[in-house]
Image (tube, rainbow, N blue to C red):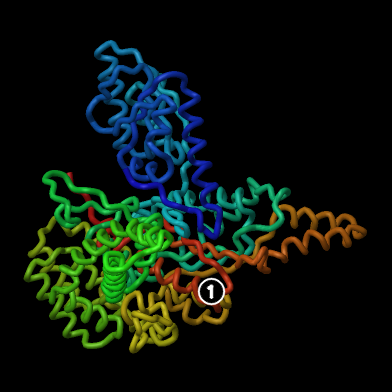
Amino acid sequence: MAQIPNLENSPLYLKFLREQSQRELVNILNSIRGKKCLVIDPKLSGLLSLIIKSTILKENGADLRHLSAEPVDIDCTKVVYLVRSEFSLMRFICSHIHNDTSKGLQREYYVYFVPRREVVCEKVLEDEKVHNLVTIGEYPLYMVPLDEDVLSFELDLANKECLVDGNTKSLWHIAKAIHKLESSFGVIQYVRAKGKASVRVADILNHMQAEEPVDTSDMVMPEINTLLHIDREVDMVTPMCSQLTYEGLLDEFLHINNGAVELDPSIMGVQREGKKIKVPLNPSDKLFKELRDLNFEVVAQVLRQKATSMKQDYKEMTTTNQTVSELKDFVKKLNSLPEIIRHINLAQHLSTFTSKHSFLSRLDMEQTLIEAQSYDICLDYIEELIHKQEPLVSVLRLLIIFSITNSGLPKKNFDHLRRELLHSYGFEHIAMLNNLEKAGLLKKQENKSNWLTIKRALQLVVEDTDTANPNDIAYVFSGYAPLSIRLVQQAVRSGWRPMEEILKLLPGPHSETKRVSTRLSLCLLVLMVDSQAALRLTHCIGASAAVDRVADGRRSLVLVVFIGGVTFAEISALRFLSAQETMAYDLIIGTTKIVSGNTLTETYMEKLG
């Protein structure tokens, strides 16, 4: 089971959100008296482990099982299903109930939908004639704190659903999550959005505030000053590039899932045959917290320094007389030894990928595409990868960068490469290529590209980047500054207005609004009715204006929400910005999902059969 992240140093009291989610789940269990079997949707299992310990669930009478097609084989008269609103999961539940009925088993069934019930799922229960046997409820888990500064809405398919399927239910979910956040930390005063989905979420959020106003009567001032929404569609180049931070590379090659990676025991120096071991990666590991946002070039150097320092301390211990205090300090240092060994093993394993000629060649090609140079060389390189049958997702990532930076592929190249892809990888991938084309990620060239203008205006390419002592966010890609984070940098500093012309060159509309709390709105209404209330209004306006000022020595907060996913490299770039002395704000990240180029591209694949 994954470790519950340490949230003690969060700039926002995220621990409160986690505790609230814990209470809500425990209350559900306590509302069902006696022993019960808690059958959990496998997709939710890892997520729940970031919120609550399994021992707490067991202490509240729950025997844990994973939901599958297999019937629930347990001596228990109460079965509680905790599931997402998915059609296929309803089939499993119906099958379980029918199986119990055929065996003459009498049980009480409860289905709790996460985060909310949907009519289409209840319709399945009705059609299968089990609806009257089931008590239905909701577990409103709209977001999960993954880290001290990262919240996830866990919407894996949000990007594809919006761009290809025209399904916008995820946008309501995001707005609901933010509205729930506001009920704990106050109404966010400034909202900026870029992209069709982002502008829509901002609109839904305003409607929610109008229909279900957040009670701010007992709040001195809102905790979050500004909300910044950005569609993934606005910048699809960044996630398709190879991440070069330590955490980013771990995700690229090993895939971080719920704060851990699964590896063969031999990689971690464990002599054990059999199943893989889970290696936790979260801020509770102090060394990982120090390393995760560094460019990988620097990681080996830092680990070497720590190992050398440990070796020197040991040498001094064995050759000189030490005081009790010095002995105590050395023992403290020894406690960090397992962490050092863990990350030396991980870094060594990563270097087997990053030292390959194929990886270095790919980095050169990504840089060439971003600089909008030598497209013929790039096309030849991509075609060679296809003929070698390199992983399809790897090829598509380069094609997507090419298509976006060149405003599409020339028609003859588009048709040729499409044929080559289908011949090499199989015609079953035609649906995926159609999805990418529909999303505008892999298309025929129709207009002249604006990429060079965008690149120059936002300074996306930074020469001579110092990865060891960075002074720009470009260090996370060794010279390329993520477009998405450049937009955040500009928006936080001066809003959208100074870069209106550049925003028009990027996909989707943009908006910028200033909102007021219910408390201030009420004061304004009183003023219109009673002119003598003007003096009393001063206090209300003063409380609202105080949002812009730093309180208790803390910086104001900006919540940056990525609709469609964010990469670990982008998170590192935002942390770098937040750490600068010239930055007036602390940054909290919200995302539909943490993604890599591989996982994002794979969402466009269609399951056959």
Q: Nearer the viewer, residue 255 or 533?
A: 255
Judge whether residue 496 can be spotted in this image: no
- Position of residue 449 measured from the top left corner of the image (x, y, whole percent): 34, 82
Q: Nearer the viewer, residue 436 or 104?
A: 104
- Position of residue 108 measured from the top left corner of the image (x, y, whole percent): 39, 18
Find residue 134 and report its image quarter. top left
Residue indicated by mark 1:
491
Residue 308 vertical placement versus 121 (above, below): below
Q: Residue furthest front?
A: 321
Q: Nearer the viewer, residue 458 or 336?
A: 336
What residue is shown at x 44% (from left), y 86% (from top)?
457
Find residue 237 and report its image quarter. bottom left
As helix, strand or loop, the secondary structure at mark 1 comes to: helix
424 with respect to 574 (left or right): left
- Position of residue 298 measured from the top left corner of the image (x, y, whole percent): 30, 75
The mark tally for this picture is 1
225 with respect to 314 (left or right): right
Judge whether residue 189 can be spotted in this image: yes
Q: Nearer the viewer, residue 237 or 40?
A: 40
Q: Residue furthest top?
A: 104
477 with respect to 489 (left or right): left
Quadrant assignment for the N terminus: top left
What residue is shown at x 57% (from left), y 54% (from top)?
205
Quadrant assignment for the C terminus: top left
What residue is shown at x 48% (from left), y 30% (from top)?
28
- Position of residue 597 measured from the top left corner of the image (x, y, whole percent): 28, 65
Q: Callout 1: 10 Å neighbours few (<14), some, many (20+)?
A: some
Q: Amino acid at mark 1?
A: Ala
65 with respect to 253 (left or right): right
